[in-house]
Image (cartoon, coloured by chain):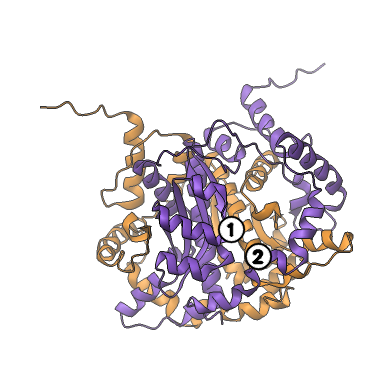
Chain colours: A purple, B orange
Amino acid sequence: MTLSAPVTPDHNRLTTLAASRYRNGQTLSGPWNEALEAILSHRSVRDYRPQAVPADVIDIAVAAAQSAASSSNLQAWSVIAVEDKDIKEKLNAVAGNQRQITQAPLLLVWLADLARPRSIAEEQDGPAEGLDYVESFLLGVIDAALAAQNAVVALESLGFGTCYIGAIRNDPEAVSQALGLPDGVFPVFGLTVGYPDPARPADVKPRLAQAAVVHRNRYDPSAHRALLGDYNQALSTFQAEQSMPRIDWTEQVGKRIGTVAALNGRHVLKGVIRKLGFPLK
Amino acid sequence: MTLSAPVTPDHNRLTTLAASRYRNGQTLSGPWNEALEAILSHRSVRDYRPQAVPADVIDIAVAAAQSAASSSNLQAWSVIAVEDKDIKEKLNAVAGNQRQITQAPLLLVWLADLARPRSIAEEQDGPAEGLDYVESFLLGVIDAALAAQNAVVALESLGFGTCYIGAIRNDPEAVSQALGLPDGVFPVFGLTVGYPDPARPADVKPRLAQAAVVHRNRYDPSAHRALLGDYNQALSTFQAEQSMPRIDWTEQVGKRIGTVAALNGRHVLKGVIRKLGFPLK
C-alpha cells in the first residue's frame, strides 16, 4: 500500500471552482491564490447597487489595464469613464437599453486608439502610413481587449461586478458622436462596473470542456464534437437554476450566427470602421 | 494639528507597484490582494529556464482563459499548446527568430475560431451567414484576447513568465499550415510560457501617465500632450537600467507607425485573413 499525497485545502478550492466552471468532473490541482480565485469565479453582473465606484478604484482599474502587455509598447488604446447619466443613456440606446447599463454607476468604454500615435507622428512631422492597414486596427483592438480584461480581474478581485457590452458595436458612429471621438478611434466594447446587487446574485456560467478548445501541437477539427451533448446538458441545468429560457447551446450558436439579422446592425461595421478613420488597407 | 490616517502596509504595496509602473509619483490606495500583485507587477519575460510547464499548470491557464467573458457565450476561440520543437521553430521562423520562442518550453497560439461555430451550424443543417462579416472576425479576435489575458494573469500569479508574440501575424498563412488550421481560424498571437530565468530578470516597463489614456465622459484629444516629455524621460531611465538602446518613446512610435516597411509584412494581412476563410464582408 502506498500513501496517497495529502490533499490540501488549496487543491480542493481549485477543483470546486472548476466544478462550477465546467460541471463535467474537470479537476484542477496546484496552489490556490487570490488571482486564481478572482479569475475562475468570474460571472457577468447585470444587477448593481446605485453607489458610485470610488475614484481610487478607478485608478487601480486603469493601472491594471495599463499593466497589460501592449504590442511594441504603442499603447494604442484609451478608455472613457462614463458616469454622466445622459451620455450613459445615449450609449444605452445604441446597446438596446440593457438594464445593466442603466443600473451601473460607471460604464467604461474601451477604445482602439490610433489617434494618439498619429498625433505623436504629426508633432514630429513624420508619416503615419502604417496606421492605414488592417494590422494597425487589429493591434489597437487587441491592446484594448488585453487592457480591459486586466481591469476586469482587478475590479472583480476587489468585489466589484462587471459586464462587457459588445452591443455598442451596433452603432459605433452614434457612440463616437456621444463621446466626441476623433478620427482613428474605435469603440471596441463597453464595460459596466459597480457593486453587485446582493439581492440578485449572478452565477458562474459553465463553459465547453477543456478538450473542445485546447489542441496539442496541431488543430484537431473534431475535438469538440463528442463534447457538445454534455455541454448542452450542463448549460440546461444552469438555465433552469437561473430561471432562464431553456435552449441548447448548439441551437443558440446556430441562431446567433445563422443570419445577417442576428448581427443587430453590425453587418455594416466595415463601412463604419472606415468612416471612423481607419482605411483598413 | 490633525492626525493623518494610518498608512497600512497594503496601501504602501500598491503605491510601490504604481511607482514601478509609472515612475511619475502616481499613487494607488485601497486593499492589496494577490490578484493586484500579479497584474501590476507584469513584465514580459524573454529568458526562460528549459523545464517544461507542468500539465496541471496548463489546465489552470486554460480554465482561466475559459473563465473570461465571451460575446454571446459563442466561445469563438481556441488555443494550441505547442511543445513540439520542430513546430515551434517553424513558428519562430515566421516571428523572425526570437530568443524567447527558442527558450520557452511552451508556446500557446491563440486563435479566433469561427470554424467551431460553423461546424455546429452545419451539423444542424443551418446557415452561418453572420460569420462572413467583419463583426464576427472581430468577435473571435476579442474573445481570444480576453481569454489569453486571463491565462497570462493566472500564469504570472503562479510564478511563470510570459511574452506575447504578435509577430506570428507576419505570416499567418505559414502559421496556419504549420498548425493545420481549418478555414475560419486565424492565429491572433502567440504567447511564450515558462519559468523565468533568474539569471536574466525582466523589469516592469513604465507606461504613459494615467491622464494620457483615461478620459472622463468625453474624449480629450489633447490629454496626452503635456505628458509625453516626462514619459520619454521615464522610459529613458528604464532603458539605461536594462542596457537597452536609448530612444525616445515618441520617436519609437513614429518609427513603428511611419512606414509600410515597419509592418514587417503585415501590410498584406487583409488578403491573408480572407484567404484563411474570413470573407470580411
Q: Nearer the viewer, mark 1 or mark 2?
A: 1
| Residue B262 seen from this side | no
State whether residue A80 is above or below residue B10. below
Q: Quadrant of the C terminus of chain B?
A: bottom right
Where residue A67 appears, as percent x and y from the top left, is 44, 51
In percent of width and height, residue B180 lies at 78, 66
Residue for point 63% across, 69% down = A266
Residue B146 on image: x %, y %: 58, 53
**Between A102 and B60, the one nearer to me in the picture:** A102
Label 1 and label 2: CA atoms lie apart by: 10 Å
| Residue at screen point 59% across, 40% down | A42
Type of the residue with mark 2: Asn
Same subunit, tags 1 and 2 = yes
Subunit of mark 2?
Answer: A
Q: What is the residue that sits farthest to the left in this orientation?
A: B1
Residue denoted by label 2: A264
Looking at the picture, which amino acid does disc 1 mark?
A: Gly
Q: Residues within 10 Å of mark 1 (few under 14, many from 20)?
A: few
Q: Is B261 on the left-hand or right-hand side of B220?
A: right
Residue at point 61%, 77% (across, down):
B269
Look at the picture and state if B140 lies above or below B172: above
Q: Residues within 10 Å of mark 2 (few under 14, many from 20)?
A: some
User: Which disc, if any, is residue A96?
Assistant: 1
Give the camera-side residue of A252 and B235: A252
Instruction: Tell me whether the residue at label 1 lies in contact with that at label 2, contact meaning CB atoms closer than 8 angstroms.
Output: yes
